[in-house]
Image (tube, helix red, strand yellow):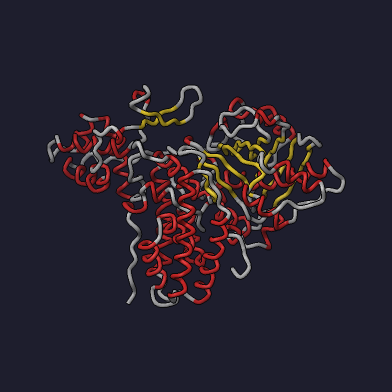
Amino acid sequence: MTVTISARSPDIVMRLERMGSFHQSRLSFMRTLMRRMKEEQWEFACTRFDVDEKGVGVALYSATTPERTYTLVAFAHDLPDDMRSDRVIATAWDTTFALHDGVPTAADIERLRDNVPQQEAGRVSGSELTLSRANRSARLWESVIDCLAAGTQPEREVIENVGYLMRTAAVHGSGKFGAADRASIADRPELLAPFQVEMLTVYLIRTFVMDLVEHMARSKSSSAVALNPELRRCFGIGNSTGLGMAPFLVTHPRLINNWIAAREEALVRVRSVVHPSDEEVSLFRSFVRRARRTVETWHSAHDLQQTKIESLMADLDQLDHHLESIDLTERNGWDRFVEWAHANLSIEGQELVVSLVLEPYGHLIDDLATTMHADESAPAAIDGSRSVAQTRDQLACDYAWALRVSWSAEDANARAWYVSEEKLEPRLGQRHEEPVGEYEQPLQPGRDAARMFLDLERSDDGETLGSFLRRHPEHRHTARRLAVLEEAPYAEIRDNTIDADMLPIDLLRAKLSFFGATHFDPRSDRWVRITMFQGAPFPDELQTSDPDAWVYPVIEGAV
């Protein structure tokens, strides 16, 4: 008898505590890109590297697909230590970048040289797809140069404790600062999956950074050595992400639904495997062992994240003990195992298990990466002929969690999202302490749904929704979200985004996990550092490497 497996309910998955515990998976955008680059045999080249002994100059790195070429234009600067900042609105950076659509001309490079280093003060053109910048790691940059210049290799443990030599603060795309709009490139097969130009930008930046540090070592000493390839792969690219990213999960409901739905469908497909093979189970067990190594090198100074890491280590101990007592090749082994994890592990551990059980099943789930894009440009159509009673019933179902909140309580309305006039960045203010209420952005759908529900209750059941909205146009945006939810059950976060205890870092981690980020290190409740592409093969290694296995460190006995 075949067991029918249902996807996890949005009431479970779309809670902020769980979303703030998501891990990267086979469907993360970095891994989607890596698989495509290998399958299509992309060609990579450094076509120019004009950087002096002080680390100042320009370099070009091209990625050529079967149909077109993309070129990273990198500018290196000699930045004084006192000017180095993680802030997205900083005006000076160690390195600045643009991803050019095609092969740039000499005039393009000069145009970009005049604009890219200025970041927000500069402008690019529709020939550019992204704009980015990065700063050196104060903890590692000079020490790695000194080691290589002296003819020695840096210690692996030191590398793993930091994980990167440079850290980006943003990779801007989708029309920002004059770059090409997403719509103009969305039909390209290699860019169909979300955030592929941003991931490609970071991948090429990583290659440039490693070339730059070795160049700086050679400039310092004629006896300098190159990084050992194994140690070289230990370096990723760091990233600092703050509140600017948080509203994305609220303002792109269709897209977020498609991300979550793909991941949940992948889990259903694996749980539906009737008899896991010995090979599949063996591969899973090796990934569990390798995941432990990842957690062991996961460091954070934030109390909340430290607690989560400690719980995750305890989960892995419990997981190891459980695996010794079960036979996953028995009928419906994965389904029973996932049920056990949900009953016995922390939420952090449960979500790690979700990612790990997907690893042996690329042949079952990798196609879902093509379903994760969405067109958010057209607003959802509202069926104005529906009755007030029908609308109220749907709202009571889809927003049941919001109707349980006491919205008159001060803590439930403690925050207000707004945009800073000076910096044009999203901010989260204290409603009862700052005069921010009148500038509030519509980023609290739960409260708005509760307000609409009250007005629906005061209306005649037979009145049409169209008539109701003519009387209450303030509820039109909620009606549109209801229309989206009819076809996109994971479109809405099922938590109060303005509660006193809401943690913006949960929003950040949810999105970054789909990028493929690792080693989440919150620096407060509002911004987080991560690592990207750590362990990934470099362009010259890609065709002889597994484009997926790099995420978890290979250790003796794990493969």
Residue 302: horizontal and vertical position, in percent? 50, 43
Is residue 549 at all visible to an observer of this figure? yes
Q: Is residue 296 left or right of residue 230?
A: left
In depth, the one of 217 and 268 nearer the eye is 217
Q: Quadrant of residue 61?
A: top right
Answer above or below: position of 558 versus 118.
below
Q: Viewer-proximal residue, 24 or 466?
A: 24
Where's residue 10, x and y in %?
Answer: 33, 52
Q: Position of residue 87 (x, y in %)?
A: 56, 32
| Image quadrant containing the C terminus | bottom right
Give the image location of residue 368, x and y in percent: 46, 58
Residue located at (45% from left, 31% from top)? 426
- Tell me the residue at 64%/32% (across/down): 84
Which residue of the protein is positioned furthest toward the right in this rendering? 222
> Which quadrant holds the N terminus?
bottom left
- Asked whether 149 or 384 is in front, the reply is 149
Residue at horizontal 29%, vertical 43%? 482
Asked whether residue 539 is in view, the answer is no
Is residue 410 shown above or below 202?
above
Whether residue 544 sits left or right of residue 482 in the image: it is right
Q: Is residue 94 above or below residue 276?
A: above
Residue at x 43% of width, y 75% of height: 326
Q: Nearer the viewer, residue 76 or 227?
A: 227
On the image, which quarter does residue 209 sit in? Answer: top right
